[in-house]
């Protein structure tokens, strides 16, 4: 084990006590605050999923009551979507990396960055209060009239929590966009930027343009419940389909908030561990923006069975196929990058492969849901659950874990045990596929989602899914254990353990408070591995 010591002057220095963390404006410390917060939300959301899968192991629905099950899948969805998946990569890796990747000392608005974390935490506390004081049973989509007429649970409180957290997303997106626009180092032109910055810029556009829509929509739901207005509730003359239009106008682009940053992470990893510049860099960069723009045009495919006209459905079906094109560009270009590359199968690279596998399956099954005839058959079945989780859990979390492992030495100055890292990936990969692939079959056979009592012929596949969930839970615990272990016992990493390119690898690990001693000057394109001398990759 290395006997070297970490550089004393770094952002992890705790000489000023805990108070300095809660008042910090250092983007790296704010990243750690977000990392701890969303890990807590992930654990809570995962606990709900564990109980649901235990209940679904038998067809008799004999573990929890109908009412409790409704509350569990609602709170699982709310916490995982709004308080883990949406902020996971932007709030953590985005906060840590964007200033260093552009060669800046911090984000454009450091105090606003800290305020964003406090706002996010406040919104999460409101939502947890809704959970503790009785829960919510309307479903995480808050569909009316379930959220207005039918529910006597804490819908208003949960909606208020998400409304508050939405301001955190807007401010974070604004901060990132200004930082990328105005604070790039000399020589760092748009087409020399790492693809992670392009992906974060695209996600920030969705944050800024889409989040106000969902915030106002949920505020209207709360106003309808409190003031007895007739906006969405048909019993008061409202229109429930209008709610779905407003909700999915944000929530489908929100899928790309969760996935597009992950695509940027995968681009960084693939380039580093194949020792090649990303094939078709310009196409991959613009595909991020194309996904963000087209994502606002396809919300209607969530309403194919909600009563929209056939002509509208045809248009949204066609647009849904178009949005697959820029996603396919990324997958094909990553594959072309790997071709004849000097590939190293380190833990981050394994997670990148896992992302490509999961995202490809999730994307291809999304084409089935974009087809009107098939969508009518599988709407509100476990086919939709499997598709969604292959994109979100299989895709976004694979990228999140890959990025966390890739930049962990930079964040902490320590290396983790590579053998345990690979074991963690294998466990997550096997557990995930065993959990969710059977659900495609269940959905096609007609098992509806949101039900916990089902015909006995569905039990075998549900038992497989529940067994996979147990393996998946272990897979998530393994990285938690060895990453925490590495904080004290991991070997010293050095500034660039992977031999990677990028400004973030030119500074010490962990980085100093202001990132760079002098302003860096960029003189070469991104991923210029052809000029790199032979470097041993851990």
Image: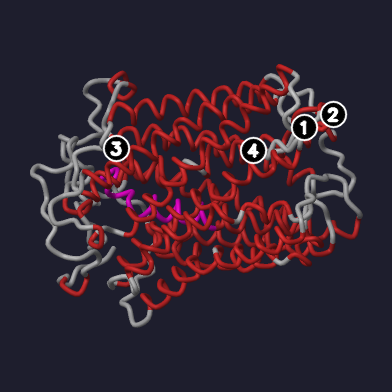
**Nearer the viewer's eye, disc 3 or disc 4?**
3
Magenta segment range?
Answer: 395-413
Distance of mark 4 from mark 2, alpha carbons?
A: 36 Å
User: Which residue is painted at 25% across and 66% down in the image?
Assistant: 527
Q: Which residue is mark 1?
A: 238
Is residue 491 found inside the magenta-colored segment of the image?
A: no
**Mark 1 Cα-neighbour bin, 10 Å: few <14, some 14–19, many ≥20:** some
- Tell me: residue 402, above or below residue 231: below
Secondary structure of residue under mark 4: helix
In front: 532, or 284?
A: 284
Mark 1 vs 3, N-terminal side = 3
Distance of mark 3 from mark 2, alpha carbons?
A: 50 Å
User: Which residue is painted at 53% across and 44% down in the image?
Assistant: 85
Mark 4 vs 1, N-terminal side = 4
**Nearer the viewer's eye, disc 4 or disc 1?**
1
Residue 205 left/right relative to 465: left
Distance of mark 4 from mark 1, alpha carbons?
A: 36 Å
Distance of mark 3 from mark 4, alpha carbons?
A: 29 Å
Q: Which residue is mark 2?
A: 235
Distance of mark 2 from mark 1, alpha carbons?
A: 7 Å
Mark number displayed over residue 28: 3
Q: Which residue is mark 4?
A: 47
């Amino acid at each position: 084990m290395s006997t070297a010591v970490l550089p004393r002057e770094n952002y992890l220095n705790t000489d000023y006590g805990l108070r300095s963390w809660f008042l910090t404006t250092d983007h790296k410390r704010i990243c750690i605050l977000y990392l701890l917060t969303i890990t807590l939300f992930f654990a809570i959301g995962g606990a709900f999923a564990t109980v649901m899968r235990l209940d679904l192991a038998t067809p008799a629905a004999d573990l929890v009551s109908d009412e409790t099950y409704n509350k569990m899948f609602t709170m699982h969805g709310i916490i995982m979507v709004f308080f883990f998946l949406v902020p996971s990569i932007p709030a953590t890796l985005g906060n840590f990396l964007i200033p260093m990747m552009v060669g800046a000392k911090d984000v454009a608005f450091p105090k606003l960055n800290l305020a964003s974390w406090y706002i996010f935490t406040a919104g999460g506390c409101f939502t947890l209060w809704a959970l503790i004081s009785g829960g919510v049973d309307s479903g995480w989509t808050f569909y009316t009239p379930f959220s207005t007429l039918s529910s006597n649970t804490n819908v208003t409180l949960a909606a208020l929590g998400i409304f508050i957290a939405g301001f955190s997303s807007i401010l974070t997106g604004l901060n990132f966009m200004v930082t990328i626009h105005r604070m790039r180092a000399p020589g760092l032109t748009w087409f020399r930027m790492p693809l992670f910055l392009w992906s974060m810029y695209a996600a920030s556009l969705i944050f800024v343009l889409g989040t106000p829509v969902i915030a106002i929509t949920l505020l209207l739901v709360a106003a309808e419940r409190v003031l007895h207005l007739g906006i969405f509730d048909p019993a008061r003359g409202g229109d429930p389909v209008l709610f779905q239009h407003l909700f999915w106008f944000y929530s489908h682009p929100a899928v790309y908030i969760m996935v597009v940053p992950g695509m940027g992470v995968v681009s960084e990893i693939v380039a580093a561990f194949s020792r090649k510049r990303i094939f078709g860099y310009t196409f991959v960069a613009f595909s991020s923006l194309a996904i963000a723009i087209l994502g606002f045009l396809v919300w209607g495919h969530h309403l194919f069975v909600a009563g929209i006209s056939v002509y509208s459905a045809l248009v949204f079906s066609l647009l849904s196929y178009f949005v697959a094109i820029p996603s396919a560009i990324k997958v094909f270009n990553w594959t072309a990058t790997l071709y004849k590359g000097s590939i190293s199968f380190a833990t981050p690279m394994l997670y990148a492969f896992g992302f490509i596998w999961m995202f490809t399956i999730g994307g291809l099954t999304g084409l089935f849901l974009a087809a009107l005839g098939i969508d009518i058959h599988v709407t509100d079945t476990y086919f939709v659950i499997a598709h969604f989780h292959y994109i979100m859990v299989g895709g976004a979390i694979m990228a999140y874990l890959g990025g966390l492992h890739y930049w962990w030495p930079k964040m902490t100055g320590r290396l983790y045990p590579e053998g345990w890292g690979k074991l963690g990936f294998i466990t997550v990969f096997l557990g995930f596929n065993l959990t969710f692939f059977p659900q495609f079959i269940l959905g096609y056979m007609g098992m509806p989602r949101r039900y916990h009592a089902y015909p006995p012929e569905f039990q075998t596949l549900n038992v497989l899914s529940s067994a996979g969930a147990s393996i998946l839970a272990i897979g998530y615990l393994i990285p938690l254990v060895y990453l925490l272990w590495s904080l004290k016992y991991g070997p010293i990493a050095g500034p660039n353990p992977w031999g990677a390119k990028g400004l973030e690898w030119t500074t010490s690990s962990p980085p100093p408070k202001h990132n760079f001693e002098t302003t860096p000057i960029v003189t070469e394109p991104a991923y210029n591995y052809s000029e790199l001398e032979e470097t041993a990759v851990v």
